[in-house]
Image (cartoon, rainbow, N blue to C red):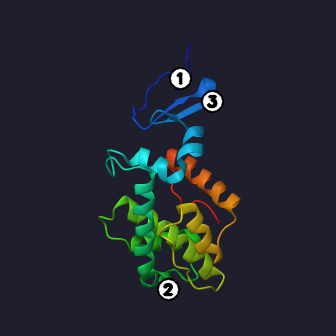
Amino acid sequence: MNEGLDGVVAAETVLSHSDAARARLWVRGRTLESAVHDLGYEGTVALLWDGFAHDGLGGADIAALLGAARERAFAAVEDWLPLAAKRPPAEAVRICLAALPDDAAPDDIAGALCVGVAAILRQQRGLAPVPPDPAATTAGDLLAMTHGAAPDPRAAKALDTYFTVAAENGLGTSSFTA
């Protein structure tokens, strides 16, 4: 007798495939390792968003969209950051996201999270927010905005790897500390 949910299909998706027996995970036909190594976060987001949030965009296109979204988010940081003062980080992030319009595009949500987390962490240390660099990777820019200096390339690569895996798993990018 089978116990549990072995063999029960709960959902079907075009986004990923998991082979637990071989400990392999694919993202739209690519192994997760390949996505991390060859595509990085922005390229993986392009794969995941294709046909859903955007059509036919590559990693460079997503990087440009996310860079522009971080700039827009930074322009609005003073609208919500004072309200987030002295709040726990998770609550402060909710305040950041609540400042977005109800019909915010996915790239604007991701940009707001990146800028918001960095601004909140700096605010907790009594420091002013640092403007984004739209040409930087999401991971590198988050680290730079958080620490006020160019990140160590190894740290930026490690955070990019984390973001890539988190994006595939459907996790938000607000569950980390930089």
Circle nearer the viewer, 3 or 1 = 3
- Residue 146 appears left or right of 60: right
- Residue 97 appears left or right of 125: left
- Is there a contact, CB below 8 Å, between mark 3 and mark 1? no
Task: Point out residue 113 in the picture as x, y percentages from the top left corner.
Answer: 49, 66
Calculate the distance from the C-alpha at mark 3 to the C-alpha at mark 2: 46 Å
Question: What residue appears at the point 58 percent right and 74 percent down from the top-left corner?
Answer: 145
Among the two numbered marks 3 and 1 on one chain, the one whose residue lies closer to the N terminus: 1
Mark 1, other Cα within 10 Å: few <14 / some 14–19 / many ≥20: few
Find disc 1 in the rendering and name its residue. 6
Among the two numbered marks 1 and 2 on one chain, the one whose residue lies closer to the N terminus: 1
Viewer-closest of 46 and 102 = 46
Task: Point out residue 20 in the picture as x, y percentages from the top left corner.
Answer: 59, 27
Give, as a three-letter code, the residue at label 2.
Pro
Label 1 secondary element: loop
Question: What residue appears at the point 55 percent right and 50 percent down from the top-left corner?
Answer: 40
Farthest residue toward the left? 103
Give, as a three-letter code, the residue at label 3.
Ala
Give, as a three-letter code, the residue at label 1.
Asp
Tell me the number on the disc at residue 82: 2
Viewer-closest of 82 and 51 = 51
- Residue 68 appears left or right of 30: left
Quadrant, the N terminus: top right
Farthest residue toward the top? 1
Question: What residue appears at the point 41 percent right and 69 percent down from the top-left corner?
Answer: 68
Question: What residue appears at the point 70 percent right and 58 percent down from the top-left corner?
Answer: 154
Find disc 3 in the rendering and name its residue. 23
Circle nearer the viewer, 3 or 2 = 3
Calculate the distance from the C-alpha at mark 3 to the C-alpha at mark 1: 16 Å
Residue 174 appears in the picture as rendered: no
Label 2 secondary element: helix
